[in-house]
Image: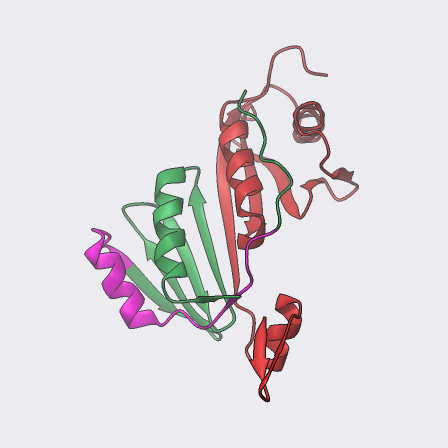
Amino acid sequence: LIMKDNSLRLVSPEQALKELDLTEHQLRFTCRVQLQDPHGDTDTLSRVYTHLKSILKGYTIQHLPDSTVMVESIVIKVSSSSEDPNAKVLLLSWSYQDEDLGSFLSTLLRKGLPHGLC
Amino acid sequence: VEEPPELLAPKPLLSGVVPLEPFLATLTKHGITEVKVEDTADGHILHLQAEDTLIQLEEDGTHIVCDNNEPLRIVLRDLVLRFLQKL
């Protein structure tokens, strides 16, 4: 709701920023989650995808060809250390607008992936 | 397994700038004192050495990069939000 030129109008937050000559400030988080998973990076990412698919109903979850899983606008990538290929690092990145889901996913993935996951 | 959050309306948009010196003072007040500041073309990178966390401050954005230390991330998030307006 913005007041401008003596009138009150209901506009989207994006439109309000524009009309008030404000610029948006993007707050982003990237979290590293350590995971022990004796598979290749691609397989680990597939397992993350399968795991999230089984838990998050009603969310848009995509496994993209650039080795990324996206849950809504949250980006998940996998890398592994050269010394210990089983020690994986998941990188989760989200913006403040997706804070609740980002926080939930980082807590969930920290618990690891369930056994018997394809 | 905890229940995933319901599909909620997204959080408000943010506006404003996080100023370096007042932000550093706020970190100190919260016990985060070992901060190495590096200037970049668009702002600053703060390395919180004891916490192994990076905070990239720019005019139109802030990026917090940390290990999965949820309590610390929430503290840093709330300290950043103190300097921003919500819309």
Please say if B58 is above or below B33: below
Which residue is located at x 36 percent, y 39 percent? B71
Q: Residue furthest top?
A: A116
- Closer-to-camera residue (B74/A109): B74
Please say if B43 is above or below A116: below
Q: Is residue A8 magenta?
A: no
Identify by letter the chain in red. Answer: A
Residue A21 seen anywhere in this rendered image of the structure: no
Q: Which x, y percent locates residue B5?
A: 58, 35
Q: Residue furthest right?
A: A65
Q: Residue furthest bottom?
A: A5
Rendered hue of chain B is green
Please say if A32 is above or below A45: below
Please say if A88 is above or below A75: above
Which residue is located at x 23 percent, y 54 percent? B34
- Closer-to-camera residue (A105/B13): B13
Q: Which x, y percent locates residue B67?
A: 43, 40
Segment tinted magenta in the rendering: B10-35
Residue B75 seen anywhere in this rendered image of the structure: yes
